[in-house]
Amino acid sequence: MSTLPLISAFLSYLTDERHFSPYTARCYGADLRQYLDFLCDELDIKLADDPEQQAFEAVRDHVAGKIGPGTITHAVVNAGTEDIRAYLEHLGEQSYSPATMARKIATLRSFFKWANKRGYTATNPMTMIRTPRQAKRLPKAITVEQIEQLLAAPDDGEVLGARDRAMLETLYSTGIRVSELVDLNSDDLDEPGEALRVKGKGKKERVVPLGSHALASIRRYREVLAGDQRFNPNNIAFQPGKPLFINKHGGRLSSRSVRRKLDKYLRQCGLDPTISPHTLRHSFATHLLDNGADLRSVQELLGHQSLSTTQTYTHLTTARLRNAYDQAHPRAEAG
């Protein structure tokens, strides 16, 4: 299905001005294309035949009434609250989870706010739409013992195993996102300072400390890599601007590749297969708070813009403390 120039302009705004990642922008685009599909079905419009698809300038002429009725662009820019509610009712019939519904509503909210601010729509139909309440889900964390079992799984006697151990150690040592891990370049590693320079969401940079075990694993990986010309004939991983963690072809790893490597070691260790790279981030934060780290420091380390996002982890540590109390205190529960 083709995409309206109006939608393409919005997605460009997300990546160019809001600095959203390409993956996030694609997710927004998929949600908006689903909305266009609904409109096309409801109005019996074929998007490929829509003349406005070829002329983005026509959207700007909306206020002058130059967009013809019966086109999908006309339907988008003239959407009212009742139209949005009809679409949400349609989504409700698809048995989406509350979290998915909330995300789709958030996409429409961002799009119509942008379109209204730019003058493409006369009103914002989302102002009267409420996002449904969601049950709060505590982030998942695993124990220190499980972490140690996982980190010991890769064989660091060969390049790929040494790389995998270094990646897992880095994820747990720093709490960085997997997208931030694969974006790391060789010169983002500060060995003397035992730290990493990380490019986070919105292209914001932060420096995170690197634990001694993670640093030793990275050094081991680079040592093994330097001695194996099959993977790295020109010592790519040591050059500024080149990826720190490379694939077997010497290129940059993808987030999906990291997930596949983690799945391999989870199976090898017999650990919960639903553990993800993000679980290591959750575990990093939880273990810090369990051991007395203050919330503001953890916020900085995680790269959270809002402290309320970090506070989610305090609920998890409180739940763990409550469980320990209930099990250990002789008068915690009624007999």
Image: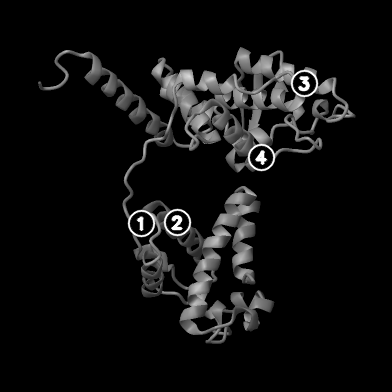
Q: Are marks 1 and 2 in contact (CB under 8 Å)?
A: yes
Nearer to us in this view, 189 or 55? 189
Nearer the N terminus, badge 1 or badge 3? 1
Q: Which residue is mark 1?
A: 131
The amino acid beneath tag 4 is Ser
| Residue receiving disc 4 | 257
Between discs 1 and 4, the one toward the N terminus: 1
Instruction: Tell me if residue 1 comes above or below residue 191 in the rendering.
Output: below
> In which image quadrant can residue 141 be found?
top left
- Distance from the alpha carbon under mark 2 to that under mark 3: 43 Å
Q: Which label sits in the foreground, 2 or 3?
A: 3
Q: Nearer the viewer, mark 3 or mark 4?
A: 4
Residue at left offset 64%, top offset 70%: 5
* 3D distance between C-alphas at marks 2 and 4: 29 Å
Pick whichever, 78 or 236, lies toward us.
236
Three-letter amino acid code of the residue under disc 1? Thr
